[in-house]
Amino acid sequence: MNAFPKKIEAFFLTSDVWVYGGLILFGSLYKTNEYPPYSWTEYISYTLLLAVLFCPVLLFESVRDYLVRSFRTIYYIVACVVCFGGYLPVFTWWYPNVEICYGILLPADFLITMALLVIGLKVVLEANRYLRKKIPSRAWLRFLELDTMILLSILLITLILALMTVSSMNNPEYHTKEQLLIGYVFDFQKIIYNLWSLVLIWGQFFITYFAFFFFYYINRHFLIPKLLKQRGFITYFLAVTTCIVLFYPIWAQLIMFLPINMLLGGMVTSAFHGENGWGAFAIIAISLPVVLTLEWFRQNNQIIALEKAKAQTELDLLKQQVNPHFFFNTLNNLYSLSLAKSDQTPELILQLSDLMRYVIYKGKEQKVAIEEDIAYIDDYIRLQQIRLHKELDFRFEKQIQDNKLQIPPLLLITLVENAFKHGIEPAEGKTKLYLHLYSDAQSLLFTSINTFEPGVIQQKGIGLENLKQKLILLFPEKHELLLQSEGTTYTAKLKLLFS
């Protein structure tokens, strides 16, 4: 059932311990590369030392979900502050450094930096968790679309270039008669005094870099979906060439008109220079595999959504089949007792009413508490014991860690119905039915053992077949159904995995 890979997947999806573990490894790698000799012994020593120093953080994150569920928000915040915020005073007190063994030194400034990074990472993760709860996932996906991210990246890059350009202007070290060299400096006083120049330069840089976005946009939204998909690669390549030779001279001429082009010494000197076309071709070539990958993911998600919709439709049809199946069984029981004018008929009708109410209302839900499904099984067995005219040795052992555990309704009853219909009812003499149910947060195991008459095939009817189909739809690769007979004893075991 691939339980181990699923546990690894669940660890990365539900826990943040690995994030802080990655930060510890980063710090160890940084310290190992700071001074030679570089050795695995040093790297492992730094890793173990940092893991020990930050063990409260790792322990807190390993039980974070439990703390959120079990404690009030104020207590969770206090525990978070103690585990994360308590490091700075400790590291400052240990100044100037911590020496463990074998010459391994951790300076106080490094420890304080690591503590600040851990605290900052916690703030970022909590903010992300809060925003994901408040903002629907579809809104996040729309915001994180590739087009939006590229435009935001262009805005950020051009803003940084504009800030460095304004800071470098009128600086003899960078601004010469021939051209302006953009230096890695930020003179915030000069920036404040030249805000209008900053806006103009930013706009010119944005127009220059927007040319790259233009060719990417045409490639993604027209050339790939229309020509590559419908007419093949040769037509696509010819269309790319035509697009470049048509538009790159226009963009090059537009950039030449911008004052920033001359200020920087002529980034573009001719509207017909070949390197401009090669730059546009490079943008299309780089974006091609990215767009194809995103398109593959989009189509794959659509296929998964269609499969889920199909599975839900099949599951609904199976539920519609289960209800009449149960009705037929119980109404036959009621009919036989009414013919015999049994005094138990009113009690049987009342029991049947409760069972029908559960089937009609709870059976439509996706999940129910396990205690509700168990109560339904108990009522069903009491109804069967009322009408049976034979001795039944019945036991039902339950080991349930959480009575509120959510499971699909009407899964377990199929095995019980099968035991009565094909085992106990046709059997002659004394019969038995032993049920055992064990469940925890990760799994459920339900066992049914009953007597039967040799030669009676237990798998007759639609009940077990529907159960098998429902298990495939609800627990793909996360279930086991074992049916076996030995002598006059029939055993059915159902195991479900929830994680």
Image (spheres, rainbow, N blue to C red):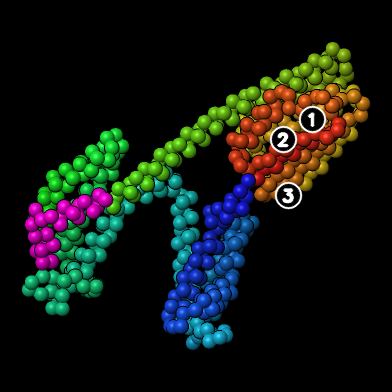
- The residue type indicated by label 3 comes to Gln
**x 56%, y 66%: residue:** 80
Magenta stretch, main secondary structure, is helix
Tell me if residue 278 is in the magenta stretch: yes
Q: Earlier in the sequence, mark 1 or mark 3?
A: 3
- Furthest-top residue in view? 339
Compared with 465, 191 (above or below) is below
Compared with 22, 402 (above or below) is above
Quadrant position of residue 45: bottom right
Q: Which residue is mark 1?
A: 419
Marks 3 and 2, how far apart in space?
A: 18 Å
- The residue type indicated by label 1 comes to Ala
Q: Which residue is mark 2?
A: 412
- The residue type indicated by label 2 comes to Leu
**x 28%, y 37%: residue:** 232
Tell me if residue 165 is in the magenta stretch: no
Q: Nearer the viewer, mark 1 or mark 3?
A: 1
Q: Nearer the viewer, residue 484 or 299?
A: 484
Q: Which residue is mark 3?
A: 401
Residue range of the region highlighted in magenta in the rendering: 259-285
Q: Nearer the viewer, mark 2 or mark 1?
A: 1
From the viewer's perspective, is 351 left or right of 235? right
Q: Earlier in the sequence, mark 3 or mark 2?
A: 3
Q: Nearer the viewer, mark 3 or mark 2?
A: 2
- The answer to whether residue 134 of the structure is visible from this angle is yes
- The answer to whether residue 199 of the structure is visible from this angle is no
Q: Nearer the viewer, residue 460 or 264?
A: 460
**x 44%, y 46%: residue:** 137
